[in-house]
Each structure stands twice: as structure tokens, then as C-alpha cells.
Image (cartoon, rainbow, N blue to C red):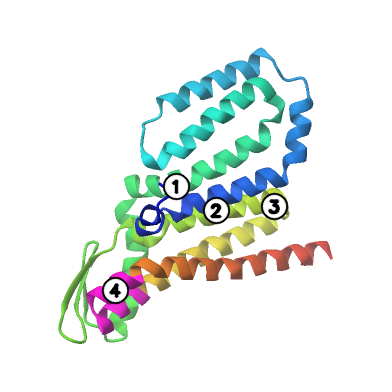
Amino acid sequence: MLSFGYVFGLHHAAPWGVLLLCGIWLWLKREGILQGMKAESYTPVFIALGLVLLTASLLMPGIADFLVFQLLLAWLAVFIIFFGKGMLIPSILLGIYGFSILFPLIIERFAELPYSKTIILPAMWILTWLGYPLESQGQWISFLSSTGEPISVLITAACAGPATMGVFIAIFALMMLDIPLPPRKAGYVFIFGVVGTWVQSFIRLIILLLVGYYRGDAALWTAHYWTIYILFPLWYLIFLYVYFYVHKKINY
């Protein structure tokens, strides 16, 4: 799970990235956690809650995607048993990490076709309008490259970016924990972020199809491998600028 091939080759960098950020936030909020730990909290309520969570962690399926979450949930359960009143921040952070894992899995399980269509339909409309010879059938897009090579690609829900959307929502939640915005402003900024995250996934699909058309199948898959690690960080830098700009306007 820590190998280069698993993290980058199989596109599992997102959960590790969110986990790293949650670890940083855990350190930043250590004073609040320590204050809660010092309070009298060794009570039947916290003991029962800790035992329930510990049992839940042991009963979770042994799937690689959940393994780290499962181990951390077990640690949180033991922490709650002994230091119940210090549980709030660690529980929120573990919930944020868990959401970043579950969100793409839920989308792929329950909204595979409609989620993938959110980028297939507009991509097909734009590229065919520009004169590119693309054909779509369900989730498949087929075309002849500029050199006559036939190419067919399956656009799954994962291609529409639920993993990056989950990461965005998780990081937004972390930012709200540290430098919160008023609810109304936060709602506007959140909607802007959701739309922007979708747009970067849409731009990525356009780039992949154009690379495939002009450079062929091999180049398309090379671009597929790396573009996500370029586009999302660039987009999030833009979002950070907007977030801090709004925060500054409110406070100064």
C-alpha cells in the first residue's frame, strides 16, 4: 500500500494525501486535544462508545482501501475509552479521512452511469462541435486518431473525478476547522470549489481525448497517468487563493 505502483500507478495518492493533512491538523490542534484528555472522562458512556467502535473496526471487511481507516478507528476506540472528552477533534479528522475514501466508492457503486455522463455529454458536444470525429455509445467514446489509429475509451465514474471531489470536500472541511468562514460565505466558496473541481476533471477528459486524437493510444494513457497529479494541485492553488481572499475581506 505504500509502494509507488500502488499509490501512483493505481491512483491511490488521494487517501494518503488526505491522511497526511489530517495528521498535520492533529498536530496543530494538539493543545485542544490535550485539554480534553486532562478532563475527567473515564465514564461508562465513553467506555461503551469506545467498545462499540472497536467492535466495528474488527468487523469491517479486510479491504486494502479500508485497512488504514480500520486501524485508525481501532486506535480512536481505545483513545475514547481512556480519554473520552478529548475525542472530538480526532473523531472529526478520522471522519474527514473516511469520507475521502468512501465518497468515490459510493459514487462508483450507486451513480456510475449518471456521474460519468456529467462529463461525457458536454465533452462530446464541445469536441464534435469543433469538428473532431468522436462517437459515443453509453460510456464508450470511439474515434480514429489523426493517423488513422482506432481508439476506444471507457469513461467510468472514476474518470469524472469523484476521488478528486472527495479530496476537495475533505480539504475544505479541514480549512473550515482551522480558519472558518461565516456560513453564507462558506456556502458560496464551497459551491465555487465543487464547480471548479468538476471543471478540472472535465478539462482533463478533453485533454486526454485530444492527446489520443493527435498522438495516439499510448500517449493518451501516459497523459491519463500523470494529468491528475498536475491539474488538481494547480486548481487547488487557485481555490486557496480565493478562500484566503474571501477570509481576508471578511476580517479586514
Q: Which residue in the rendered view is the most extreme toward the front?
A: 3
Residue wearing tag 4: 220
Closer mark to the observer between disc 4 and disc 3: 4
| Residue 173 screen position, x and y as percent | 61, 50
Checking the image for residue 67, the label placed there is none
Q: Earlier in the sequence, mark 2 or mark 4?
A: 2
Q: State if disc 3 and disc 4 touch (CB < 8 Å).
A: no
| Mark closest to the chain's N terminus, 3 or 2 | 2
- Judging depth in this view, the residue of 248 and 54 nearest the camera is 54
Residue drawn at 66 percent across, 56 percent down: 186
Q: Is residue 172 above or below residue 154?
A: above
Give the dominant element type of the magenta stretch: helix, strand or loop. helix
Residue drawn 49% across the image and 48% down it: 100
The crowding category of the residue bearing disc 2, from other C-alpha atoms within 10 Å (few below 14, some 14 to 19, many at least 20), is many
Residue linked to disc 1: 103
Q: Nearer the viewer, mark 3 or mark 2?
A: 2
At mark 1, the secondary structure is helix
Between circles 1 and 4, the one closer to the viewer is 4
* Amino acid on which the number 4 mark rests in the picture: Leu
Residue 216 coordinates in the image, percent (x, y): 23, 79
Is 220 contained in the magenta span?
A: yes
Q: Are marks 1 and 2 in contact (CB under 8 Å)?
A: yes
Specify the segment rendered in magenta.
207-223
Of the residues under marks 1 and 4, which one precedes in the sequence?
1
Name the residue carrying label 3. Answer: 183
**Mark 1 → mark 3, Cα distance in angstroms:** 23 Å
| Structural crowding at the residue carrying mark 3, measured as other residues with C-alpha within 10 Å and reported as few (<14), some (14–19) or many (≥20) | few
Going from N to C along the chain, the mark reached first, 1 or 2, is 1
The residue wearing badge 2 is 169
Residue 175 occupies which quadrant of the picture?
Answer: bottom right
